Structures are given as C-alpha cells and as structure tokens.
C-alpha cells in the first residue's frame, strides 16, 4: 500500500471507531445495554485497526488484531498496557453479547465498557 492510501485508510478506520462510539452512546441512552457492549467493543476494535493500518499491518481476525496490536504497540511500550486490557476484556464481553442469549448486561456493565471505549479512543487518537 502506498503512503497516501495508508493515510486515508487510517483516517477512515478511526472515523469508524468514533462512529461506533457515538452509536454505543445512543444505545446506552436508550437502555440498550447489550448493544452498547457490542458497539463499545467495535469502537476499540476500529481504533486498534487504524493504529495497525498506520504501520501497514492488516489483521485477518479479531484474535489476530489482539495479537498484532500487542506485538506492535504493547511490547514496544507505545500504547498503555492497562488501556489495552480494555480491548481484550471487551472482546470477551462482545462475544457474550453477540452469541450468548442468556448473557445479561446491566446498566453498570454497559456504562463501564462505554467509559473504557472512550478512554481507549482518546489514547489511540494521540497516536493517529
């Protein structure tokens, strides 16, 4: 990929992250807590995708994104390890929200992951 394409893709990916965060907020305010969890995760996922794209790296799966992000941004100390934990925890919660029909997410659960997504995006934006 050439530099201009990468630059545009990073911006597009990060804009998707912000859109997902906005959607999560709307859903939270509508008491749709399960969906808040899902969109909060995808906000972080897209922000991480943008940062990997910046290094011309493409993840082929959710697990791959976690592994590649850890290698490129956590092991190198570029991204805060504690904040990265928000993404890994949210991945598990997103699986439950998407595939476990018995999973229940309270207002507090949704509010917590939404706040973590906001922090993740703030940290990521400084690196974009």
Image (cartoon, grey):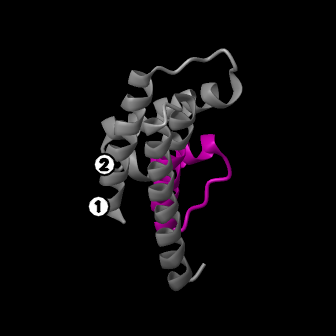
Indicate left or right for 78 with 17 as reference: left
Q: Residues within 10 Å of mark 2 (few under 14, many from 20)?
A: few
Rendering coords of residue 38 (x, y %): 56, 37
Q: Which of the image's four quarters has the C terminus?
A: bottom left
Q: Residues within 10 Å of mark 1 (few under 14, many from 20)?
A: few
Per the image, label 2 sits on a secondary structure element best described as: loop
Q: Which of the image's four quarters has the N terminus?
A: bottom right
| Magenta highlight: main SS | helix
Residue drawn at (47%, 47%) of the image: 44
Indicate left or right for 119 with 97 as reference: left
Residue 54 in the image: above or below residue 40: below
Q: Which residues are magenta?
A: 42-71
Residue drawn at (45%, 60%) of the image: 51
Q: Is residue 102 magenta?
A: no
Q: Do we see residue 78 in this rendering? A: no
Residue 8 in the image: above or below residue 107: below
Upstream in sequence: badge 1 or badge 2:
2
Q: Please name whichever residue, 30 or 73, is drawn nearer the observer in this view of the structure.
A: 30
Q: How many circles with numbers are drawn on the protein? A: 2
Residue drawn at (45%, 49%) of the image: 21
Q: Which residue is mark 2?
A: 77
Rendering coords of residue 28 (x, y %): 45, 36
Q: What label does residue 126 carry, if any? A: 1
Q: Do we see residue 24 in this rendering? A: yes
Question: How far apart in space, not on screen, are marks 1 and 2 (Cα)?
Answer: 14 Å
Per the image, label 1 sits on a secondary structure element best described as: helix
Q: Please name whichever residue, 117 or 88, is drawn nearer the observer in this view of the structure.
A: 117
């Amino acid at each position: 990929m050439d530099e201009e394409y990468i630059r545009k893709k990073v911006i597009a990916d990060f804009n998707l992250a912000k859109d997902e965060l906005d959607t999560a907020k709307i859903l939270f305010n509508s008491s749709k807590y399960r969906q808040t969890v899902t969109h909060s995760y995808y906000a972080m996922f897209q922000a991480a995708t943008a940062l990997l794209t910046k290094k011309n790296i493409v993840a082929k799966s959710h697990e791959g994104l976690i592994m590649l992000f850890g290698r490129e941004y956590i092991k190198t100390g570029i991204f805060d390890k504690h904040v990265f934990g928000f993404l890994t925890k949210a991945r598990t919660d997103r699986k439950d929200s998407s595939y476990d029909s018995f999973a229940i997410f309270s207002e507090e659960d949704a509010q917590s992951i939404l706040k973590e997504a906001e922090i993740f995006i703030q940290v990521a934006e400084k690196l974009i």
